[in-house]
Image (spheres, coloured by chain):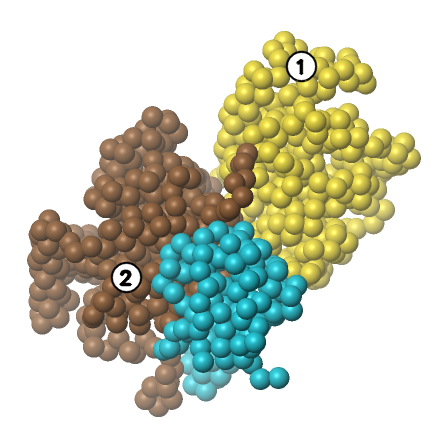
Chain colours: A yellow, B brown, C cyan
Amino acid sequence: MPQHWEERWKASRPIAPALIRSFVGLLVVGIGTFLVGLFLDPMRAWQIYLVNFLFWGALAQGGVVFAAIYHVVEAKWGLPIRRLAEGMSAFLPVSLFLFLPLYFALELFFGQIQELNPSRGAWFDSRFIFVRGGLGLSSMTVLSLLFVYYSLRPGVGVALERGFRLRQGLYRWLTAEWQGEQIEVHRCVRGTDFLAAGVLIAYPITYSFMAFDLIMALDPFWYSSLFGAYYFVSTFYLGLAGVTVVAVLGRWYFDMPPITTAHLVDLGKLLFGFNLLYAAMLWSQYVVIWYGNLPEETHFVVLRLWENPWFPLSWAALFAAIFIPFVIFLSRKAKETPGIMVAVGTLIAVGLWLERYVLVVPSLWHGKGVPFGWMEIGVTLGFLGAAGLSYVLFLQYFPMLPVVKASVDGPLSH
Amino acid sequence: MSQLTYGQVDRDILRAMEAPGRRYYIVFLLNFLVLAWGAFAWRYQIVHGMGVSGLMHPVMWGVYITNFVFWVGIAHSGTLISAILYLFRVRWRASVYRTAEAVTVFALFTAALFPLIHLGRPWFFYWLLPYRQVGGLWVNFRSPLVWDVFAVMTYMIISMLFFFTGLVPDVAVVRNRTSGLRHRLYAFLAQGWQGTDRQWRHYKAAYIFLAALATPLVISVHSVVSWDFAQSIVPGWHSTIFAPYFVAGAIHSGLAMVLTLLIPLRRIFRLDAYLTQSHLEHLAKLIILTGLIVGYAYIVETYIAWYSNNVPEWQRFLYQVTGEYAIPFWIMILFNSLIPLLFFVKRIRTSTPWLFAIAILINIGMWCERFVIIVTGLAHEYDPYSWGLYFPTWVDISITLGSFAWFFFWFLLFAKFLPVVSIVEVKEELPPPMKAITVEG
Amino acid sequence: MARPSAGLVGSFRHLDSLLQAIDRLRQAGFRDLQALSPVPHHAIDEALHKPPSPVRVFTLIGCLLGATTGFALTIATSLHYPLITGGKPIVSIPPFLIIVFELTILFGGLLTLGGMLLNARLPRVQIVPAYDPRFSEDRFGLWVRCEASDFDTVTRLLESAEAEEVHRVGE
C-alpha cells in the first residue's frame, strides 16, 4: 500500500477553475429563476423545486448506498470506483439544507388534499410531514457522512504522516486524535462496517417514507404498497447510473489508469441487472392495478400513461430509463466502450428525472398543458450547479483512491 | 480449504457415495412409511371426494395451496445460490450450490403435486395445458392460474437443465470409478464427457447463459405465484407489494431449508473441510437480509392498509391480528422477521445448534405465513354474511406430511447417488497445481 | 489437407507445464491441439487461441423465438375463440406478456443447451482414445494430432515441458 500512495495522489489533478466557475454560475441562475418564479407562479416554482430536490438528493444518496453495499459485501472488483461514489455524499448536507424551504410549500401541496380526503387526519398535517421527513433525511445524511468520514480518515491521516503539505488545517481537523496507521486502519474498517450497515438499514425506510409522503400523498386517493420499495430501487438505479458517468468522466479527466475496461463492464452488468429490477418493480405495480381495475388505483396510472398531456413524457421516461438501456446492455461491446457507457448513464439519469417529474407534477398541476419552460429549466440548472459544485470540491480536497481496504484487498487491478 | 489437492477432493466427496449403512436404511424406511400414509390419504380423498378435506365455502383454498406456495418458495433459494451468486462471482457458493440446486428440483417435484391434489379430479390435469380442446377452445391466457402453469413448468425444466448440466463433469469422475450397472447409469448421465478444452469452453458459456436466464426466471416465478392472489380484489390479497414480498419470502424459507439440510449432511458425510462454518455463516447473513425484507413488507402492508382508508382492507387486518387465525399470524411475525435478527450476533450465527434451531423456526414461520395470507383472506372477505372458517382434517394433514416425506425421499436418494458437493467447482476454487510455487497475498 | 488421425498424448501434473507445452508446440507449428483438464481454466483457452463460444447466439435466437411463440400463441388462440372473461379485452397484452416472458426464458434455455451440445459434440457414445480417467481427476492432458514423421519432435517438445508420460493414440 505505501508505495502506491504518492502515485495515487498524483492521479488527482486539480479541477479546472472554469468548471467551478460555471457550476457557481448555474447555481446563481437557479436561485434567481426560483425567486422570480415564486412571485410569478408559486405552484410552478415549488413543484419543479420538489422534482429537483427528489432527483438530486436521490442521485447523491444512491451513490453512497452503492459504496455502502460495496463495502458490506466485501466486493473486490472495483476499488477505484468506490471513492468516486463516496464523493457523491458531498451533496447530502446541501440537499438537507434544501429540504428546509419545502416547509413553506407543504401547505400549498397538502392543504387541498386535506379537504378532498379529510380522513387522513393529523398524519398529513404539513408540519408533521416536515418533521418526520426532516428527521429521516437528517439521520440518513449523518450516517452517510460518518460512513464516508471513516472511509476517508486513514487515507488523510497517512497523507499527513508521509509529509503531505497541502490542506493541512482541514486534514488535521479530520484526523483528530490520530493513533498511527496500524491502529487507525483497523479501527476505521470497523467503523465503516458498522456505519455501512446503518446506512443500508436506514435507507429503505427513509426513502420509502419519502416516496409515500412527498410523492404518493400528493394524490389524495391513490395508494400502492410497493411504491416505497419501487422508489428506493429507482433511487439506487439512479445512483448507479451516476457512478457510471463519473467513473468514465473521472477516467478521462484525471487520466486514471486504475479504472479499467473490466470495471466498466462490471458496472454495465450491474446497471443491466438493476434496469431489470427497476422494470420489475414498475411492472409488479402496473399488472396488479391493471387487473384489479379499481378506480382509486387506476386513475393515477391512466392519467400518466394514456392521457394528454402527460403520456408522451411518461413514455419518454420509460424508453430512456428502461427500454433503450436494456437493448444497449445486451451487447458486450457497448459495455466496453466508455463513450457509450457515459451516454447510457446520462440517458438513464434523464429518464429518471422525467420519471420524478411525471410522478409529482400531474398530481399538483391543474393548469393547461405541460408546465415546462424557462422556470423549470432554470431551477433544474440551479440544482445541477449545486450538485456539481459540491462534487468537484470533494474531488479537489480528498484523495481519489480509498486506502481503508487497500491493504486488505491487495493490488488495485481487477 | 487451501491445503486440499485435486485428488483429495475426489476422494472426500466420493466417499459420501459409498454403500450406505444401516442407519440410512432405517431413515429411508421410516420416511417411506410417512410417504405411503400420505399417498393413502390422497387415495382416500380421490375416492370419497374433496368433502373429506377441510375445504368449505368460503375458504376453498386451504392447506393444499399453502403447501404449493411453500414448496415453490423453498425452490427459490437453490436458484439464488446457484445462478444469482454465480453471476455475482461469490466464491463461497461453490460447495453449497449442488445441494441447494437439488433442493430446488425436489421442491418443485413436490410443489407441482399440489395443484393436482387440489384439483379433486387429478386425471383431468391436462386441461391446464395449452392445446385445442373441444370446439376449438384453448386455455384462458388471461387467468393467473394459467400463468402459474407456464411459470412453474418453465422453472422446473430450466432448473433441471441447470442441475444436470452442472452434474455432467462431476458424474464423469464417478463414471470412471464405478463398474457394472452403476457405471452404465453414470456413463449415461455423463453423456460422454471428456473435459476437452472445446467441451469446457462451450460448457462454461452455456452455464453462464443458463444462470443469466434463471435469474429473471426465479424472480418471475414467485411473482406469478403471488399474482394468483394479488390480481383478485380480495382484501389483503390485492396489494402491489406482493410480488417482491413473495420472492423475498421464498428465498427466506429456501435458505432456511438449505441450512436445515446442510447441517446434518455435513456431519453425516464428514464434509467439514468443504462445508465450513463460514459457509453456514454466509447463509445466515443472507437470511438476515431476506428476513429484513420480509419484515419491511409486513410493516408496509399494514401501513398501506391503514393509509388506503379502505374499510374491508383495514377490517381484515384487524381480523388477522386478533381473529381465529391470530396464533399463526403472530408465529409468522416472530419466526420470520424477529428471531432471524438474532443472526446479527456473531456468536449465534456461528453456532451450529442455534443455526439449526432458527432455520427450523423459519421453516415453520414461512409455512404459517402462507397459511395466514390464504386462509384469512378468504375467511373474511367483503360480506359479513359469507364469512366462514377453515380447519384442516386428517386428510389435509396427512397429505401435507406426505409431501415432506416425498421431498425427503428424493433428497435421500440424491445424497447417496450423486456428489452432494460439486467436485469441479470446488477444484476451481483451489489454486491449480503449479510447478512454479507462487507466493499468494 | 486431411486431418491426421493419429497423435500423441502428453500428460502433465502441473497447469503451467501444460501451458508451456502448448506454447512450444504452437511455436513449432503444431496447431491441432486439444487440452484435457479436470477443471476449466481461461489460461488454457488463451494459450490455445480459441475464439469465444458461439453459444450466445443460440441463446439469443431461442429468446426471440420464445417471445414470438408467446405472442402468437396467446393472441391467435384468444382471437380464434373470442370469449370475454373477467371483463378483460380479448387481446389483453399485460397478462399475455407474462406468458411471453416465460416462453422467452424456456426457449432461450433449451436452445442454450442445444447450442452447447451441438458445439461441444455431446452426447457421445465413443470416448476419444486420448482420454484417460486421470484427466478428470488431477492430471492435465494434451492431445497433439500429427503425422507419424513428426512424432519424435512432438515427444521431445512435450517432454521438454515436463510431461509425465507421452503415448501414442489412434492409427
Q: Which residue is mark 2?
A: B177
The residue type indicated by label 1 comes to: Thr
Q: Residue furthest top?
A: A177
> As rendered, which of B218 and A262 lies closer to the eye?
A262
What x and y, as percent, mark residue B25? 10, 54
Q: Residue at x 44, y 77 (%)?
A: C170
Identify which residue is drawn at 39% across, 49% down: B6
Which label belongs to residue A175?
1
Q: Secondary structure at mark 1?
A: loop
| Residue B314 horizontal side relative to residue A257, left or right | left
Relative to B284, does residue C36 appear above or below in the rendering? Answer: below
Instruction: Give the quadrant of residue B221.
Output: bottom left
| Number of residues whose C-alpha sits closer than 10 Å to that of mark 1, classed few (under 14), some (14–19) or many (20 or more) | many
Q: As drawn, which residue projects farthest toward the right?
A: A18
Q: Chain of mark 2?
A: B
Which is more toward the observer, B47 or A181? A181
Mark 2, secondary structure of its residue: helix
The N terminus of chain A, quarter of image: top right
A293 vs A408, left or right, is left
Q: CA distance from mark 2 to mark 1?
A: 63 Å
Q: Amino acid at mark 2?
A: Arg
